[in-house]
Image: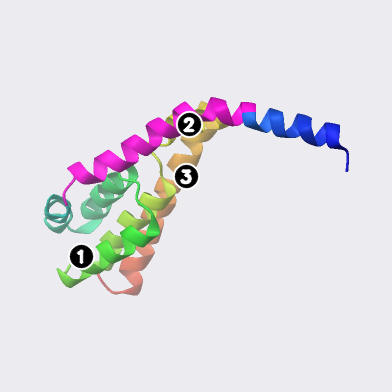
């Protein structure tokens, strides 16, 4: 173990992390504030009134903007299932909540570049719609 190299590596990592702090702070504030303002009832009204491909697309758009961790998303979807929301719509919502990051895009573009960040988010959105379609077929909701 080389102490000098280790010390240089730790200092470099700390310096790079200090550049990340403002972006991470802004992202955390946005992630914390938006779900509070988008009430569960409003979300249910948006999702429940539109079925079919349009319902899945709207759920995917809403999920793209809202970014919530799995331990919040899955109990939320349990409530939606109890209210009768189709599985394919919930599939679109949950998949985009976890795979597409509108709020994390500024941080992603800084480190991945604009093209790769856009491609990652677009690919996640398309995959979410495909998963929703497959879910609808499997559960016989189409």
* As drawn, 85 above or below 34: below
Q: 136 or 5, which lies in front?
A: 5
Q: Residues within 10 Å of mark 2 (few under 14, many from 20)?
A: some
Residue placed farthest to the right in the image?
Answer: 2
Q: Which residue is mark 2?
A: 107
Mark carried by residue 109: none
Answer left or right for 128 relative to 75.
right
* Helix, strand or loop status at disc 1: helix
The residue at 36%/53% (across/down) is: 129
The residue at 28%/65% (across/down) is: 75
Task: Measuring from the top left, give residue 58's x and y in whole percent.
Answer: 23, 48
Is-magenta flag for residue 23? yes
Q: 10 or 142, which lies in front?
A: 10
Mark with earlier residue (3, 2) = 2
The magenta-colored residue range is 15-39
Asked whether residue 48 appears in the rendered view, the answer is yes
Cα gap from disc 1 to disc 3, whole angstroms: 26 Å
Task: Measuring from the top left, give residue 118's x and y in whole percent.
Answer: 47, 34
Asked whether residue 142 appears in the rendered view, the answer is no
Q: Which residue is mark 3?
A: 123
Is-magenta flag for residue 112? no
Answer left or right for 88 relative to 100.
left
The residue at 83%/33% (across/down) is: 5
Q: Which residue is mark 1?
A: 80
Answer left or right for 10 relative to 126.
right
């Amino acid at each position: 173990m080389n102490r000098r190299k280790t010390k240089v590596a730790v200092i470099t990592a700390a310096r790079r992390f200090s550049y990340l702090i403002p972006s991470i702070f802004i992202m955390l504030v946005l992630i914390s504030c938006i779900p509070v303002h988008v009430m569960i009832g409003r979300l249910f009204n948006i999702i429940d009134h539109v079925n079919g491909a349009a319902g899945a697309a709207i759920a995917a758009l809403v999920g793209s903007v809202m970014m919530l961790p799995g331990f919040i998303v899955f109990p939320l979807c349990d409530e939606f299932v109890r209210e009768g929301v189709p599985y394919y719509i919930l599939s679109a919502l949950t998949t985009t909540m976890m795979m597409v990051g509108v709020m994390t895009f500024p941080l992603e573009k800084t480190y991945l570049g604009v093209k790769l960040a856009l491609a990652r988010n677009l690919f996640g959105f398309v995959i979410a719609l495909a998963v929703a379609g497959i879910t609808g077929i499997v559960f016989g909701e189409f």
